[in-house]
Image (cartoon, rainbow, N blue to C red):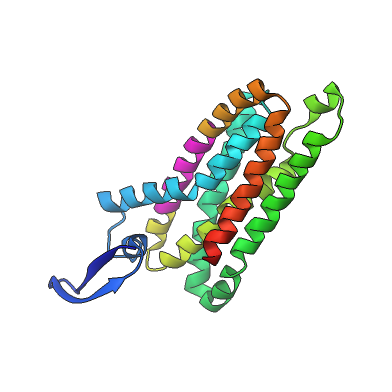
């Protein structure tokens, strides 16, 4: 927890000290969207918010070591899209129906936990069921599962929209674009690393991938509850 001084208007007189996370101060609307601090903060947010998507990308790479380059780009792009969309939705909700958003915010960790427990459990079950080589080759992340993963790993980014309600629409869009770009790069890297582990570990990588999904869900839930 960081402590810092909040200045009154432009007179640089300290009015009071507020104890709150530093990122809330950085998102408070005090900074112009073209200032380096704003850009740096958005990049840092992108790295933090994409941590879960990176871990899931790692698991997907392990589960599907034969994933093509085109498919890798598609998977990373889906995660990046949801990381772009969620902060904007949060920003829009707060500026229009803040009461509804605050009520929904309590459900975010439960939704993420449920989705990732389902996906992780399905992956674990598939690893222990007997399958032919043809079935293994055909086992790929489906479109619906990819969408669920994208939602589960980005839904906590709705809270960023809540803390950036003072942004203009241009600043909100720019911040979301930076977050999305960071997510795409990290997820692309995660899939490639996961593929190498998947090739080496064979079917055991599905067990590890499923456990990673479950642990991410638990981490999101426990972090929100603490």
Location of residue 112 (image quadrant):
bottom right
Please tell me which residue is depicted at 75% across the width and 40% down the height of the picture: 124
Tell which of 100 and 103 is nearer to you.
103
Query: Does residue 173 lie above or below 146 as drawn?
Result: below
Q: Residue 207 vs residue 184: left or right? A: right
Q: Quadrant of residue 21?
A: bottom left
Q: Quick check: 112 left or right of 88? A: right
Residue 180 part of the magenta-drawn span: yes
Q: Residue at x 48, y 50 (%)?
A: 49
In the rendered view, would you say 192 is above or below 164? above
Give me the residue at 73% from left, 27% from top: 203
In the rendered image, residue 8, in percent from the top left (x then y), is placed at 19, 75
Residue 177 appears in view:
no
Task: Look at the magenta stretch and give its main secondary structure.
Answer: helix
Would residue 99 be found to the left or right of residue 42 on screen?
A: right
Asked if residue 80 lies in the magenta stretch, the reply is: no
Q: Nearer the viewer, residue 68 or 205?
A: 205
* Viewer-closest of 47 and 131: 131
Q: Which residues are magenta?
A: 174-188
Residue 27 locus on image (x, y percent): 35, 62
Where the N terminus falls, by quadrant? bottom left
Comparing 156 with 83, the one in front is 156
Q: Residue at x 66, y 48 (%)?
A: 214
**Residue 64 shows in this picture:** yes
Q: How many marks?
A: 0
Give the image location of residue 217, x and y in percent. 62, 53
The percent position of residue 103, horizontal first and vertical second, equals 58, 75
Q: Quadrant of residue 218?
A: bottom right
């Amino acid at each position: 927890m960081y402590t810092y001084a909040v200045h009154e208007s432009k007179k640089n007189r300290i009015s009071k000290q507020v104890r709150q996370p530093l990122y809330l101060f950085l998102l408070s609307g005090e900074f112009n969207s073209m200032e380096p601090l704003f850009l740096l903060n958005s990049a840092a947010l992108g790295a933090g918010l994409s941590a879960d998507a990176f871990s899931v990308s790692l698991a997907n790479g392990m589960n599907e070591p034969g994933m093509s380059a085109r498919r890798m780009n598609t998977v990373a792009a889906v995660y990046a899209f949801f990381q772009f969309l969620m902060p904007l939705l949060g920003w829009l909700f707060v500026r229009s129906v803040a009461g509804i958003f605050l009520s929904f915010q309590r459900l975010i960790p439960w939704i993420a936990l449920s989705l990732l427990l389902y996906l992780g459990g399905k992956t674990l079950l598939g690893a222990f069921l007997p399958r032919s080589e043809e079935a293994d080759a055909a086992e790929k992340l489906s479109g619906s599962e990819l969408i669920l993963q994208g939602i589960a790993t980005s839904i906590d980014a709705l809270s960023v929209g809540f803390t950036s309600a003072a942004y203009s629409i241009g600043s909100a869009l720019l911040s979301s674009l930076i977050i999305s770009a960071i997510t795409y790069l990290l997820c692309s890297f995660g899939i490639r690393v996961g593929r190498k582990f998947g090739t080496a570990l064979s079917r055991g990588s599905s067990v590890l991938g499923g456990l990673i999904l479950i642990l991410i869900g638990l981490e999101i839930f426990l972090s929100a509850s603490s």
